[in-house]
Amino acid sequence: MEITIKKYVLPLKHTFSISRESHDFQDSMIVALKHNGKTGYGEATSNPYYKITFSTMQAEIENVREEIENYNFKEPEAFHAFLVSKNLSNFAICALDLAANDLYGKLLGKPLYEIWQTDNSSYPVTNYTIGLDTVDKMVAKMKEMPWPIYKIKLGTQQDVEIVRELRKHTDAIFRVDANCAWTAEETILNAPYLKELGVEFIEQPLKADDWKGMEKVIHKSVLPIVADESCIVESDVEKCGLHFTGVNIKLTKCGGLTPARRMIAKAKEMGLKVMVGCMTESTVGISAIAQLIPQLDYVDMDGAMLLKEDIADGVIIKDDGKVIFPSQGGSGVSLR
């Protein structure tokens, strides 16, 4: 196989803020794997919370470039196991795993959801994320993008008031994400008010390692609680089962489609609701997520919708939330 690595700086439509950080651009690493005349594409974005940059990911892959290029590629699962054995970060593995899956499907001439024998005639609509901002700016973002489901980023002392103000401007379903900013007491107190305001669930209200707090919340919250920062890798799913009603799986954090599919199966086995989320990827990463949506209860794959300029063609999300899957095999990605 031949590897190509390229850095993109993705400009966002608006400053994107959550409880712990803000940014106007998203650094992204695109990996291309070329084999037998076909090219598969994968992506992983940088993330300060996990101390991941383009440079760290690139260096990891360059250290094992020769071994990867000499690898006898047959199918993604064995390739993923090979990558894990090289002690790469999950972010670097994700980019390579997504590229390998895209390549595999293109070699077979079939989309991944078809290879996995899933029916894409029914799937959840993605939410559209409204970053934390002044109420006026958050309302303006909703008016700019009318959508049936919004994920509202929170993490202030006025979070219920923010949601109350936003509710005056839309009948859409709300989901709220505190990104670890609340205490157990705040979560339990906020939940009844948020439920009255049409909030479907609360995502990651407490710090990722506050398992005692989450045990308290899961027994007393009137709203479902979905794990994000507490659910990173496969082994986290079982632990989350005792503290959450659902898990949000991120491909970049867990290491790609290959482990994500196992995490989905485990979560379902445990009776958890299953969501897959994005980390402001371009259409390269979003097209990979889209292959999973027939298996999901919820999905957050609005990354490319938040960009001022995209870098790829693949899955298209229409104004009504309908997903148009590309005719190419794999994830169906091509770079512009």
Image (spheres, helix red, strand yellow):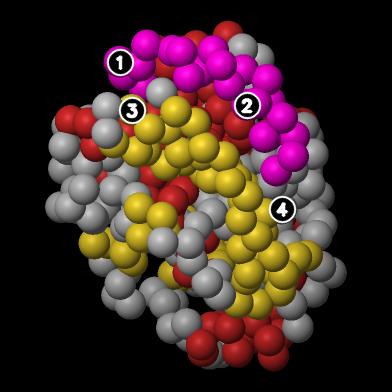
The CA span between labels 3 and 4 is 40 Å
| Mark 3 or mark 1, earlier in chain | 3
Label 1 near label 4: C-beta < 8 Å? Answer: no
Q: Which mark is residue 35?
A: 3
Residue beneath disc 4: 179
Label ID, residue 239:
none
x then y, percent, for residue 307? 55, 69
- What's the residue type where badge 1 is placed? Lys
Q: Are marks 3 and 1 in contact (CB under 8 Å)?
A: no
Which class describes the residues within 10 Å of circle 3: few (<14), some (14-19), or many (20+)? some
Disc 2 marks a residue whose amino acid type is Ile
Q: In whole angstroms, how far apart are the C-alphas of marks 3 and 1?
A: 10 Å
Q: Main secondary structure of the magenta part?
A: helix
Mark in front: 3 vs 2: 3
Say what secondary structure mark 1 lies in.
loop
Q: Earlier in the sequence, mark 2 or mark 4?
A: 2
Residue 142 vertical placement versus 95 (above, below): below
Q: Earlier in the sequence, mark 4 or mark 1?
A: 1
Q: Would you say residue 73 sits in the magenta stretch? A: yes
* Residue 271 position by quadrant: top left
Q: Quadrant of the N terminus?
A: top left
Q: Which residue is mark 2?
A: 61
The reply to whether dot 1 and dot 2 touch (C-beta < 8 Å) is no
At a point 67% along the width and 34% down the height, the residue shown is: 58
Query: Closer to the N terminus: mark 1 or mark 2?
Result: 2
Left or right of 39 on screen, residue 89 = right
Q: How far apart are labels 1 and 2 at the CA level?
A: 20 Å
Q: Which residue is mark 1?
A: 74
Tell me which amino acid carries mark 3. His
